[in-house]
Amino acid sequence: MPMATAWNRGKYWEAHLVMPEPKKRVFVGLISLSLLILAVLVGTGWYLVQRGSRVAWWLLLMVLSAAIGFLIYGGVGILGLLVSLITGRTLPVLSRAQDTVAFALLPVALRVGALLGVDKDRIRASFIEVNNQLFRQKEKRVHPQELLILAPICLQNAACPRKVTNDIRQCRRCGRCSVGGLLELADKYGVNLAVATGGTKARQLIRDLRPQVVIAIACERDLVSGLQDARQITVGAIANQRPQGPCLNTQVDLGRVEEALQASLLE
C-alpha cells in the first residue's frame, strides 16, 4: 500500500499540531548580543587595569588578552554564520569558527534570552534551524548503511504493547503513530532506523552503528543536548510535534524526514 494512503487512513493526522516556524535570527541575535556584552566587560576591565597595582595589572592583562582573543574568534564565527544564513553558502575558511562559536555561545544565549524573557525552547528551535542550514550546506552524502534515523520512544502510540526499542520490526504499521511511516521510509531508502528511550540509549546506538550522518527526531531540549554530544557527526535535527504535551504520542513531519534523507544519500 502506498505510504500516503496508509497514513491518510490512520489516526495520525487527527491531532496534528501546526508549530510556528522557528526564526534563525533569534539565536544569531542573542549570541551577537552576548558578544557585545563581553566586549563591554573587556572595555571595563581595561579601564580598571589602568588604575590597579602592577601585579593586578599583569593578571588582568592576561585575562583581557584571552577575552580579546575570544572576541576576535567569536566575531569571525558570527560573521561566518551571517554569511551562511544570508548567502546560503558556507565559506570554508570560516566553517570551523562558526561551528565552534555557535555551540560555545549557546549556553550564554540561553542565559541572555532568559534575562530578556525569551522562551528557552524558542532559542533552542532557532539554534536547531541554524544547525540544519549548516547541515544542508555541508552537502555531505553517504551510502544508506552509513545513515541513521534516530527517533524517540514517545513517537510510538502509548497504548501499543509492542517493544519497538528492542526490535523496530515489531511495529505492525497500523497507522496510529509515526513509527510505521518512519519504517516505510527506512525500507524505501535502505537506511538504519532505531528508537531510543533517552539520551544514554541514543549515544549507545550511535557508538554501535557508527553512522556518518544522523537524522535525529526529538523535542528541542533533547535535540540540542544530542547535537552538543555528537558534534563529530553530521546531524540533521527535526523537532517533534506535541499535540498531547511532551513525551506522549508525539508526531513528526514525515515529509521533512524524507527531504533530509534525499539531501544526505548518494544517488
Image: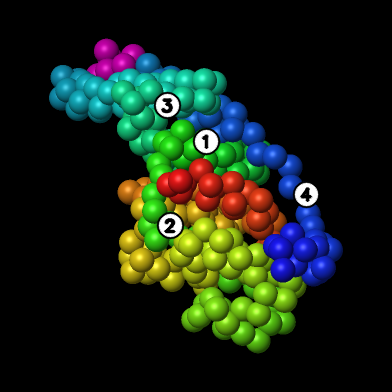
Depicted 1 relative to depicted 60: above or below:
below
Q: Quadrant of the N terminus?
A: bottom right
Asked if residue 126 shows in the view, the reply is yes
Between discs 4 and 2, the one toward the N terminus: 4
Task: Choose mark 3 or mark 2, whichever is in front.
Answer: 2
Tag 2: amino acid: Pro
Mark on residue 18?
A: 4
Name the residue tied to disc 2: 144
Depicted 69 relative to depicted 252: above or below:
above
Mark on residue 133?
A: 1
Residue 98 x %, y %: 39, 30
Between discs 3 and 2, the one toward the N terminus: 3
Q: CA distance from mark 1 to mark 3?
A: 10 Å
Name the residue tied to disc 3: 90
Task: Choose mark 4 or mark 2, whichever is in front.
Answer: 2
Between discs 1 and 3, the one toward the N terminus: 3
Q: CA distance from mark 2 to mark 1?
A: 21 Å
Colour scheme shown: rainbow
Whether the magenta-drawn stretch holds residue 51 is answered as yes
Magenta-tinted stretch? 46-52
Tag 1: amino acid: Gln
Q: CA distance from mark 4 to mark 3?
A: 31 Å
Between discs 2 and 1, the one toward the N terminus: 1
Q: Residue at x 72, y 76 (%)?
A: 174
Position of 20 with respect to 257 (left or right) is right
